[in-house]
């Protein structure tokens, strides 16, 4: 028996599993034609837009819970 079980014998424990994923758009560089010996000028917008997806599942019952958040802070 673990220390937690001996300290809290009446506590009910539930098992939940969690996964996270960051979904978003990043600018893509495309190949462009240029004259030999010259570098092509390409404008790129360095803008990012992310969406964080957190999913929780209780394996015993199949109950699920989802969080969709525009930003995550570790502070």
Image (cartoon, rainbow, N blue to C red):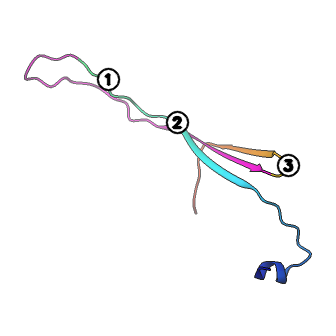
Q: SS of the residue at dot 3?
A: loop
Quarter of the figure with the N terminus: bottom right
Q: Nearer the viewer, residue 73 or 3?
A: 3
Please report the bounds of the magenta region as a residue range: 33-59
Q: Nearer the viewer, residue 3 or 28?
A: 3
Q: Which residue is mark 3?
A: 61
Q: Residues within 10 Å of mark 2 (few under 14, many from 20)?
A: few
* Residue beneath the point at 84% across and 66% down: 13
* Residue beneath the point at 16% across and 17% down: 34
Q: Nearer the viewer, residue 39 or 58?
A: 58
How far apart, in angstroms, are the residues tagged by discs 3 and 1?
47 Å
Specify the quadrant of the image occupied by residue 66. top right
Q: Position of residue 38 (x, y in %)?
A: 10, 23
Nearer to us of marks 3 and 2 is: 3
State yes or no: residue 32 in magenta. no
Q: Give the farthest residue toward the right.
A: 10
* Residue beneath the point at 58% across and 63% down: 75
Q: Position of residue 45 (x, y in %)?
A: 37, 31
State yes or no: residue 40 in magenta. yes
How far apart, in angstroms, are the residues tagged by discs 2 and 1?
18 Å
Q: Residues within 10 Å of mark 1 (few under 14, many from 20)?
A: few
Q: Which residue is mark 2?
A: 24
Q: Residues within 10 Å of mark 3 (few under 14, many from 20)?
A: few
Nearer to us of marks 3 and 1 is: 3
Q: Position of residue 57 (x, y in %)?
A: 75, 49
Can you say whether 33 is above or below 74 in the image?
above
Q: Which residue is mark 1?
A: 30
Q: Position of residue 19 (x, y in %)?
A: 64, 50
């Amino acid at each position: 028996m673990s220390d937690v079980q001996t300290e809290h014998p009446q506590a009910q424990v539930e098992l939940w599993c969690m996964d996270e994923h960051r979904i978003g758009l990043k600018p893509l560089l495309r190949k462009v034609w240029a004259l030999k010996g010259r570098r092509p000028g390409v404008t790129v917008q360095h803008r990012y837009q992310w969406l964080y997806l957190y999913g929780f599942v209780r394996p015993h019952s199949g109950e699920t819970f989802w969080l969709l958040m525009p930003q995550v802070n570790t502070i």
